[in-house]
Image (spheres, rainbow, N blue to C red):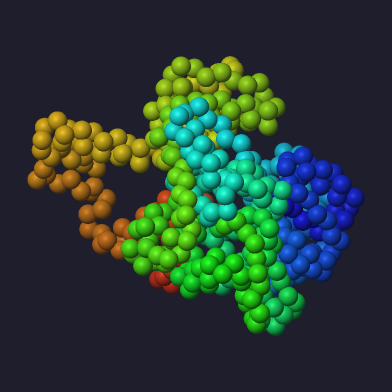
Amino acid sequence: MRLLIVGSLDGYIASAGKIALDSGAKVAHVDDVDQAMASLRAGKGADLLMIDVGLDVAAMVKALEQERIAIPVIACGVRADPQKAAAAIRAGAKEYVPLPPDAELIAAVLAAVAEETTAFIYADPRMAEVLRLAEQVAGSQASVLITGESGTGKEVMARYIHTKSKRAGKTFVSVNCAAIPENLLESELFGHEKGAFTGAVARRIGKFEEADGGTLLLDEISEMHPRLQAKLLRAIQEREIDRVGGTQPIKVDIRLLATSNRDLEEEVKAGTFREDLYFRLNVVAVEMPALRERPQDIQVLADHFVRKYSEANAVPKPLFSPEAREVLAGHHWRGNVRELENTMHRAVLLARDGKIAPESIVLTGGKLAREDAVSRAANAASTVTGGPAPLPNAAGAAVEEGEDAVPVKLVGKTVAEVERDLIINTLEHCLGNRTHAANILGISIRTLRNKLKLYSQEGFAVPMPGEGEARSA
């Protein structure tokens, strides 16, 4: 991950930078907002910007917005000053980090922005097979489409392919297509010329030029608008791009990787993804298996995360009880490796007497896991009897066909009302995170935003990022 530090940070710049470097980040430093913008326009790039709260944070955020540069901004200041912290957050900073810098806090902030590791921890033959394929194609120049459920490690796989490629010594640039609004994504990818739009005060180099000679990852490409897909297709075919407002094509030399947690063939059939672009990207397909499809890796990864978070929290590494291992082996893991990591972090904190027992393991998605188990049981019963299996009622008990199998809470509601409640409740569960909610709901981020806008206009409370409970309307 690339970190750009802006300002003096009252002499703590060296220690903050060293902590970031020790966490695996590439660190650059400039003195003020103007120098920061000049560096970003020149294509030097950054995945995270940390700015001294003594500088004009609002001006930094406004300049980024005007020039359509999508980078998270973290404000830093000596000691926890509530007024300065609040002002920085109001100005648009994502977080406020007090100084002197705390190693764990800096590392946590960096980890929240990007995962830099390219190492895979595995024991299951299914994962070994996937890695063999990745290594086999890594040395080529072919585009690679990496698919899989959310949390399976698609971006980690992309970085792994880059490190095994002939471009390993060159730049790796990642663009999250789901996290950047449509009106910003074109400039983010292709750059722009001075005067191309309001706020374009200077030429800006886009991600294609920034990755020239190296690898460009288009993360969650299924969220890209069809209009922009057409421009992307031309860039792939011709190996040249046009900056927004530009008149001359610019040659680029990149290795293109893309990820998606959706079935792009289905998206093509639905008309939301261009078929010709799909075939251009899908020269080689690498499918990341769900964690439940690689069961031998569950305990191996669990041990790794327990060791990691025991060290991070400065506590002795607890041991697993046999019953706790059974709980892990029997869970559905719909959040895959990411869910397992969070679960193990909690288990380390909740362990007693140096042991992780079943009560130390707080699992998520229990309702969905139960419904999945009921579905599997119903399918198994149908196979055995040759006929339809009993349906579960609202309480989870079986009812025969012909009885009322509709949950009572849904009776009397329209489909639109049920959909609205599901969307808002899911958003609350995700603490307002639109991307995570869209992934869980199985809809595009664009569809989710449109529905939330409609609900707000109708007077319903819509959680904002960071809110776990809906606000009163």
- x, y percentage for residue 207? 65, 63
For the view shown, which residue lies furthest in the front direction? Answer: 140
State the image coordinates of residue 48 (x, y, percent, origin top left): 70, 55
> Horizontal and vertical percent for residue 63?
72, 71
Please tell me in which quadrant of the rendered image residue 454 appears. Answer: bottom left
Image point (44%, 61%), residue name? 278
| Residue placed most toward the observer, 227 or 67 | 227
Depicted 300 relative to depicted 434: above or below: above
Quadrant in which residue 252 is drawn: bottom right
Question: Could you tell whether 360 is left or right of 87 in the image?
Answer: left
Residue 205 sits above or below residue 51 on the image: below
Q: Quadrant of the C terminus?
A: bottom left
Horizontal arrangement in the rendering, residue 289 relative to residue 64 (left or right): left
- Residue at 53% over, 71% down: 234
Residue farthest toward the right in the current orientation of the protein: 11
Q: Residue at x 57, y 49 (%)?
A: 140
In the image, residue 121 above or below residue 147: above
How many numbered dots are placed on residues in this image?
Answer: 0
Camera-nearest residue between 419 and 26: 26
Residue 238 locus on image (x, y percent)? 56, 69
At 53% from the left edge and 67% from the top edge, which residue is drawn? 237
Q: Is residue 45 visible?
A: yes
Relative to 242, residue 149 above or below: above
Position of 223 with respect to 52 (left or right) is left
Q: Is residue 397 visible?
A: no
